[in-house]
Image (cartoon, rainbow, N blue to C red):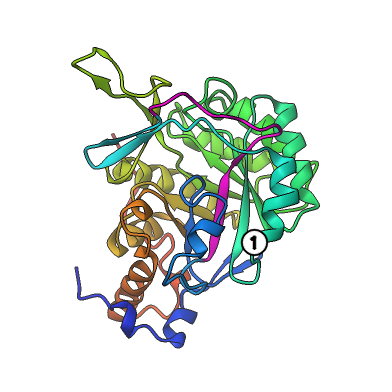
């Protein structure tokens, strides 16, 4: 790749070229920090070196109607080029989040997005309704969590059920709805199409892939939940294709996509933008480089300067190719 700018080379004029309009939210950067990777946000924003110019939005960890303890250990396991997680949506419940966590967040430094999870349609609706009157900027519907035994993955792998969840949640909130799509399904395009018709405003593509690991000495699953969600560079080629496929459904409807799955560099981010992503989701990479965001922003600007792009919007969907064939 070309020589990319470093963080020190990036000035305010350059950063202005990275601003993105996402569902009416004016993000300072195309980077969105993904749910489950930065807790409830305050953990990450306290990191020395954090700047609101580096991050456009933060997705809070998954929130359910009632508190959840999550899965039995082990919950996280490193794999080649990635990691498996089976946290199980551990969270204090929507009441606690609204009363105690949201008041502690600084909404002047970035946008915060609630991640709504549930085991039933009614739970999704109730949690979404509670956030409608909150200071949250948007709501991500997590219909594709692969590491809980109920809800989540069941809804996300069936286009009819996915659309039902979106339609029901749409009725109880005026905030932007982002539907988080699963790669563990037959046709992500059909699912996206149905959710679009049901009223989603945006998509997050993709959630983790289902996977497992085995302890050969004990001949037992490593994860207490047996299966978990695989994230990290190992899933990037799959995620990239899914973003491209969903973009074909969205591109004529002005529906933005958060492209995510194994992004660890500016090159990765640019691939997702070119495939059709409007913004870039960073997750697993934060575990080994908490300050990777300014490096990615600088690299994108370096690419734009080389290729004569004046704004990041010019990169989204700018893929020179024909249709995919078998």
Q: Camera-side residue: 244 or 321?
A: 244
125 relative to 10, above or below: above
Q: Is residue 58 rendered magenta in the image?
A: yes
> In this view of the protein, can residue 58 be seen by the observer?
yes
- Which of the 4 quarters of the picture holds residue 318? bottom left
Position of residue 136 measured from the top left corner of the image (x, y, whole percent): 69, 56
| Side of 227 relative to 251 (left or right) | left
The region drawn magenta spans 56-74
Indicate the quadrant containing the C terminus: top left, top right, bottom left or bottom right. Answer: top left
Image point (20%, 76%), residue name:
3
Residue beneath disc 1: 105
Considering the numbered disc 1 on the image, is that residue within a helix, a strand or a loop? loop
Position of residue 204 measured from the top left corner of the image (x, y, whole percent): 52, 47
Furthest residue in direction top, as rendered: 219
Q: Is residue 128 rendered magenta in the image?
A: no
245 relative to 266, above or below: above
Image point (49%, 53%), residue name:
258
Label 1 crowd (10 A; few <14 / some 14-19 / many >=20)? some
Name the main secondary structure of what is drawn in magenta: loop
Position of residue 275 measured from the top left corner of the image (x, y, whole percent): 38, 54
Position of residue 234 measured from the top left corner of the image (x, y, whole percent): 27, 41
Image point (43%, 43%), residue name:
245
| Side of 35 relative to 227 (left or right) | right
Indicate the quadrant containing the N terminus: top left, top right, bottom left or bottom right. Answer: bottom left
253 relative to 155, above or below: below
């Amino acid at each position: 790749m070309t020589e990319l700018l470093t963080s020190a080379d990036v000035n305010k004029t350059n950063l202005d070229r990275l601003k993105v309009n996402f569902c009416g939210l004016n993000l300072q950067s195309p980077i969105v920090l993904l749910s489950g990777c930065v807790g409830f946000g305050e953990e990450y924003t306290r990191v020395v070196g954090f700047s609101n110019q580096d991050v456009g939005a933060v997705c809070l960890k998954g929130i359910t109607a009632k508190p959840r303890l999550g899965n039995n250990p082990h919950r996280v396991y490193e794999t080649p080029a990635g990691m498996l997680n089976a946290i199980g949506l551990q969270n204090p419940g929507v009441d606690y989040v609204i009363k105690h966590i949201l008041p502690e967040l600084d909404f002047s430094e970035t946008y915060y997005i609630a991640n709504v999870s549930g085991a039933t349609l009614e739970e999704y609706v109730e949690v979404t309704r509670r956030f409608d009157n909150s200071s949250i900027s948007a709501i991500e519907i997590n219909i594709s969590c692969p590491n809980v035994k109920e809800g989540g993955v069941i809804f996300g792998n069936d286009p009819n059920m996915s659309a039902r969840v979106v339609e029901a949640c749409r009725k109880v909130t005026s905030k932007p709805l982002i539907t988080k799509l699963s790669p563990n399904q037959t046709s992500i395009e059909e699912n996206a199409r149905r959710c679009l018709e049901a009223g989603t405003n945006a998509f997050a593509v993709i959630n983790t892939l289902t996977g497992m690991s085995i302890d050969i000495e004990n001949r037992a699953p490593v994860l207490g939940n047996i299966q978990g969600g695989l994230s990290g560079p190992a899933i990037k080629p799959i995620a990239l294709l899914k973003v491209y496929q969903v973009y074909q459904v969205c591109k004529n409807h002005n529906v933005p996509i958060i492209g995510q799955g194994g992004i660890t560099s500016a090159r990765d981010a640019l691939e997702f933008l070119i495939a059709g992503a409007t913004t870039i989701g960073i997750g697993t990479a934060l575990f080994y480089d908490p300050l990777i965001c300014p490096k990615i922003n600088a690299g994108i600007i370096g690419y734009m300067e080389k290729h004569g792009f004046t704004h990041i919007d010019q990169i989204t969907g700018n893929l020179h190719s024909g249709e995919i064939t078998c």
